[in-house]
Image (cartoon, grey):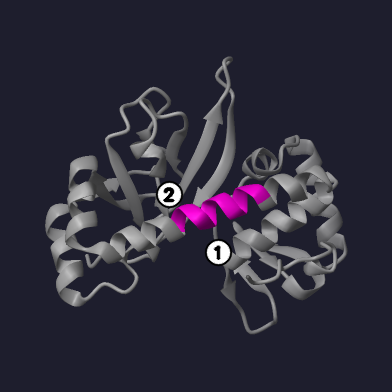
Amino acid sequence: MTPAGELWQGLSDEERAQVAKVCPERHVGKGSTIFAPGDAPDALYVLQSGLVTLSHVSEDGQASILQVFGPGDVFGELFLTVSARPFLATTLAACVVIVIPGKTFLHLLSAIPRIGFNFICVLSRYLTEMALDRGQSSHKWSLQRLALTLLKLSAAHGVEEEEGSTAIALPLTHQILADLIGTSRETVTRHLGRLKRQGLVSQRRRTLLIRKASLQAQIPNWPPPQA
């Protein structure tokens, strides 16, 4: 499989082939652990297909989802700066993951400088999103946080449909959404019911359908201005 995603943007076909030779693909089943807290930070990962959640695990073993990664996303990026993994990465669906061992990544940085530039862009975007999330969450009620999360998921993983709605075909349970916005499953169920009654959200089997323009009206200053 040819490497795809933000980390490989601007690479020539020859450079992509070079990456594919030294970075193995791993096929991972649904519900599997890619890395856990305390694991050695020995590799960077690029998701080719499937879905991965990144979670923080509390001292009593409770996992709170911090982020959902889709195809093309980079994760495990802290591997250069920590002595042990601080987070848990698990699969929500069967995945294909490109594994970049630490020594291989350092070699690629010197052999293909564009990868270093792309990696800086990835880190900068993650830091920006983290800062915005923290600021926005501190000033929004849980209903607004849910609406914001649905908008962000639709931007990253949504598929536009003819009826003017956006389909989010992710295996998102009410508990996963609750973890993402820091509230209870019951609260998410209540809020989703309200959004459905307002015609802002609907459901087709396991796929959530949202009307982005209408849902954006629930969130002042969304989408954020482009730098």
Q: Is residue 44 above or below residue 88?
A: below
Q: Which mark is residue 93?
A: 2
Q: Which mark is residue 128?
A: none
Mark before the other along the chain sequence, 1 or 2 = 2
Q: Work out whether 53 lies above or below 56.
A: below
Residue 40, percent from left and from top: 31, 27
Which span is picked out in magenta? 122-131
Apparent side of residue 55 relative to residue 138 in the rendered image (left or right): left
Q: Label 2 sits on what residue type?
A: Ala
Residue toward you, 77 or 182: 77
Q: Is residue 71 left or right of residue 16?
A: right
Residue 43 drawn at (x, y percent): 28, 40
Quadrant for residue 165, please give it: bottom right
Quarter of the image where one finds residue 16? bottom left
Quarter of the image that includes the C terminus = bottom right
Q: Amino acid at mark 1?
A: Ala
Q: In terms of depth relative to the viewer, which is nearer, 212 or 42? A: 42
Q: Residue furthest bottom?
A: 162
Q: Closer to us: mark 1 or mark 2? A: 1
Residue 168 appears anywhere in the view: no
Residue 124 is inside the magenta segment = yes
In the shown orientation, is residue 67 left or right of residue 111? right
- Residue at left 53%, top 35%? 55
Give coordinates of residue 219: x percent, y percent: 82, 62
Helix, strand or loop status at disc 1:
helix
56 lies left or right of 179: left
